[in-house]
């Protein structure tokens, strides 16, 4: 009898919780929304969150407060959001790390596919294969491959750190081209670019956001972009697939998530606000200035995309024996 009473109280509590969430969803939003960025200020992710947050705030009649919680490849910020109340007042912008980190980290305290409610894909910022033309006489992807095959292990490529999309772009390139190159990880894109410009490393798959100024100045030569289609930021630069590696594609993406259990009505409101923000000419102009291309889409599309990416990168991490140092 006591067990039945406990079950009844539990059911009653769950029903009350559901009713409370439903009531909150009906009036959403009633206060500012915290938008967690799991990386330091200043990067493409931070810029996208702030740009979209401002536009979404106008649409929803509230403010979006960006909070940077960096560390552990995005895991610290993500874990914070996974534990937050599922009421729509804490959301997160994430990137490829949501799909990559489960294969890299053994001590993950959250499950990207179970502990979050997808809201929407937001944008893509292609990576671009660059080299220093003053120190490296290559002008195409085929030149890079030919040189690497002639001298296995001689040439190097820099990255912003193990497991970043910049690193994975290089690992995927080496795997598809069946060549041997030395990976040199740095703590961020800035130091890596500095050594590329200084001639300490030979190549880098950098974000268009940080590479474009150096490409425009002539200090770096763009050889190919990593996405399936050419980038509007560098329309004359071919894709890696076009340039000699059919099937090669790496899409550095950004997306929005809420804690699992967030009411569907709240997710729908956020998704609609994001869709309208991405269509705003001012937002498009700001995204274009950093090489970002808006995507949008449904929560289900993001859920499927995350599952597909998780499987893809787990296979590459295993094949290339990638490990966090």
Image: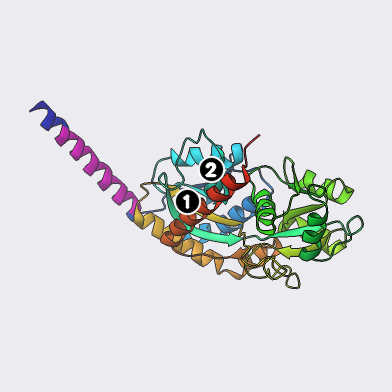
Q: Which residue is mark 2?
A: 103
The question of residue 17 being in magenta is answered with yes
Task: Identify which residue, 206 or 141, lies in the foreground.
Answer: 141
Q: Residue at x 50, y 36 (%)?
A: 108
* CA–CA distance in space, label 1 to label 2: 20 Å
Q: Earlier in the sequence, mark 1 or mark 2?
A: 2
Image vertical order of residue 249 relative to residue 199, above or below: below
Residue drawn 61% across and 70% down? Answer: 281
Eye-nearest disc, 1 or 2: 2
Q: Position of residue 193 (x, y in %)?
A: 80, 49
Question: Which contiguous range is marked in magenta?
Answer: 7-25
Q: Is residue 308 left or right of 163 when viewed as pictured?
A: left
For residue 29, side relative to residue 100 (left or right): left
State the image coordinates of residue 140 (x, y, percent, origin top left): 80, 66
| Residue drawn 86% across the image and 51% down it | 197
Q: Residue furthest left?
A: 1
Within 10 Å of disc 1 (Cα), the crowding (few <14, some 14-19, many 20+) is many
**Residue 288: assigned label:** none
Instruction: Count up the numbered dots.
Output: 2
How far across and down, in percent of the image, does residue 4 sit? 11, 32
Task: Mark 2: give few (<14), some (14-19) or many (20+) Cα within 10 Å.
Answer: many
In this view, the residue in front, 249 or 245, is 245
Q: How is the image coloured?
A: rainbow
The kind of secondary structure the magenta stretch mainly shows is helix
Question: Where does the image place residue 316, in percent across and percent down from the top left?
Answer: 58, 50
Which residue is at a point 20% across and 35% down the rendered structure image? 10
Question: What is the residue that sits farthest to the top in this orientation?
Answer: 2
Q: Quadrant of residue 293?
A: bottom right
Q: Which mark is residue 257?
A: 1
Quadrant the N terminus occupies: top left
Dot 2: element: helix
């Amino acid at each position: 009898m006591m067990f039945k009473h406990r079950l009844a109280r539990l059911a009653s509590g769950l029903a009350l919780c559901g009713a409370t969430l439903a009531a909150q969803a009906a009036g959403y939003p009633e206060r500012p929304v915290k938008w967690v960025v799991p990386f330091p200020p200043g990067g493409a992710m931070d810029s996208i969150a702030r740009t979209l947050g401002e536009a979404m705030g106008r649409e929803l009649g509230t403010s979006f407060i960006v909070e940077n919680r960096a560390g552990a490849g995005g895991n610290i910020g993500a874990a914070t959001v996974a534990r937050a109340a599922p009421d729509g007042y804490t959301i997160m912008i994430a990137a490829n790390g949501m799909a990559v980190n489960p294969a890299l980290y053994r001590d993950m305290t959250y499950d990207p596919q179970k502990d979050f409610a997808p809201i929407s894909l937001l944008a893509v910022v292609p990576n671009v294969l660059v080299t220093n033309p003053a120190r490296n006489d290559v002008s195409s992807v085929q030149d890079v491959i030919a040189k690497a095959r002639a001298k296995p292990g001689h040439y190097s490529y820099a990255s912003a750190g193990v497991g970043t999309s910049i690193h994975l772009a290089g690992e995927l390139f080496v795997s598809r081209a069946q060549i041997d190159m030395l990976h040199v990880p740095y703590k961020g894109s800035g130091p890596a670019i500095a050594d590329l410009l200084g001639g300490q490393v030979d190549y880098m798959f950098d974000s268009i956001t940080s590479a474009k100024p150096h490409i425009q100045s002539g200090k770096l030569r763009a050889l190919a972009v990593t996405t399936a289609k050419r980038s509007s930021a560098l329309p004359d630069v071919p894709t890696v697939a076009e340039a000699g590696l059919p099937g090669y594609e790496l899409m550095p993406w950004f997306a929005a998530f809420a804690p699992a259990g967030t009411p569907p009505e709240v997710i729908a409101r956020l998704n609609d606000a994001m869709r309208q923000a991405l269509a705003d000419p001012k937002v498009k102009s700001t995204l274009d200035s950093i090489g970002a291309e808006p995507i949008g889409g449904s929560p289900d599309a993001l859920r499927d995309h995350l599952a597909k990416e998780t499987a893809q990168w787990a296979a590459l991490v295993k094949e290339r024996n990638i490990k966090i140092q």
